[in-house]
Amino acid sequence: MSKTIGLIIGSQRTARVGDSIAKWFAQTTKLGSNSHFKYEVVDLADHKLPMLDEPLPPMMLNGKYSSPVITKFSETIASKDGFIFVISEYNNSFPGNLKNAVDHLFGEWKGKPSVVASYGFFGGSSSNDQFTQVLNKSFLAMPVTNTRPKMTLNKTMFDEAGKFKDITTDFKPFEQSAIDSVKDLEQLLQDIETKKVVEQNAS
Ligand SMILES: Cc1cc2nc3c(=O)[nH]c(=O)nc-3n(C[C@H](O)[C@H](O)[C@H](O)COP(=O)(O)O)c2cc1C
């Protein structure tokens, strides 16, 4: 098993619920015992990226970033073969910090298969659709799984501190789509591997 998937926590507010949802996703889909890949959590909150201010677009920088923080983020993303993005919805779209993180790099992301799993009061549907377009309609050309989990939040799920009271019970309706999205991801990884072998044999 040589593949590694990054489970990306896409929100970075101190009081976020994104970290709990990423944990639920990993447990529900048994990511830790997946036979096709191992996974590592990539928490954008740990990376403290600046707002994009590099002198050239990332595809022209040849990996020469202006700060060790960006270089470390580049190494973190480059070491992954695919991603599961767990993303919130803010004002009918995905969080700005996530776009900033994506925009900092290019080759590190390019062509790598991904799951987009969103949450919000309407399942984070707009966030999910818009972020999927960013990944697969841009030059990043990242294939996104057909199954894109959309987890619907409801005020009754939260305690007074804004934390989940019982995410295991409340997120039951979303378990199957999370599991299916991981199966789709395994298939996309396999398709890429098969294509590589065919191309090598043809050359
Ligand atoms: C600035 C802001 C805007 C929001 N806009 C939306 C929205 O458009 N649609 C929605 O369903 N939820 C919206 N919400 C609610 C979030 O989905 C909810 O707060 C969620 O917990 C945010 O994810 P996080 O806790 O990981 O940051 C918004 C929350 C914030 C902070």
Image: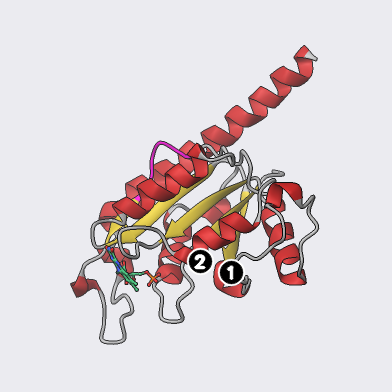
Q: Amino acid at mark 1?
A: Met
In magenta stretch: residue 148: yes
Local packing at callout 1 (Cα closer than 10 Å; few below 14, some 14-19, many 20+) is few
Residue drawn at x 71%, y 65% as measured from the top left: 70
Give the magenta-colored segment's residue range.
144-149
Up the image or down, 111 lies above or below 176; here it is above
In magenta stretch: residue 146: yes
Q: Residue furthest bottom?
A: 160
Spot occupied by residue 135 in the image (x, y as percentages of width and height): 51, 44
Q: Residue furthest top?
A: 202
Up the image or down, 196 lies above or below 148; here it is above
Which part of the image, by quadrant, shows the C terminus? top right
Asked which secondary structure carries label 2, the reply is helix
Local packing at callout 2 (Cα closer than 10 Å; few below 14, some 14-19, many 20+) is some
- Compare residues 48 and 174 and report the one nearer the observer: 48
Residue drawn at x 58%, y 39% as measured from the top left: 139
Left or right, 159 with respect to 190, comes to left
Ligand 1 image-quadrant field:
bottom left
- Compare residues 11 and 36 and report the one nearer the observer: 11
Question: Please, what is the dominant secondary structure of the magenta stretch?
Answer: loop
Q: Earlier in the sequence, mark 2 or mark 1?
A: 1
In this rendering, does residue 202 appear at all? Answer: yes
Spot occupied by residue 157 in the image (x, y as percentages of width and height): 24, 72
- Compare residues 27 and 56 and report the one nearer the observer: 56
Residue identified by numbered label 1: 51
Spot occupied by residue 142 in the image (x, y as percentages of width and height): 55, 40
Q: Amino acid at mark 2?
A: Asn
**Corner quadrant of residue 151:** bottom left
Residue drawn at x 28%, y 56% as measured from the top left: 123
The disc label shown at residue 97, or none: 2
Spot occupied by residue 29 in the image (x, y as percentages of width and height): 45, 52
**Corner quadrant of residue 71:** bottom right
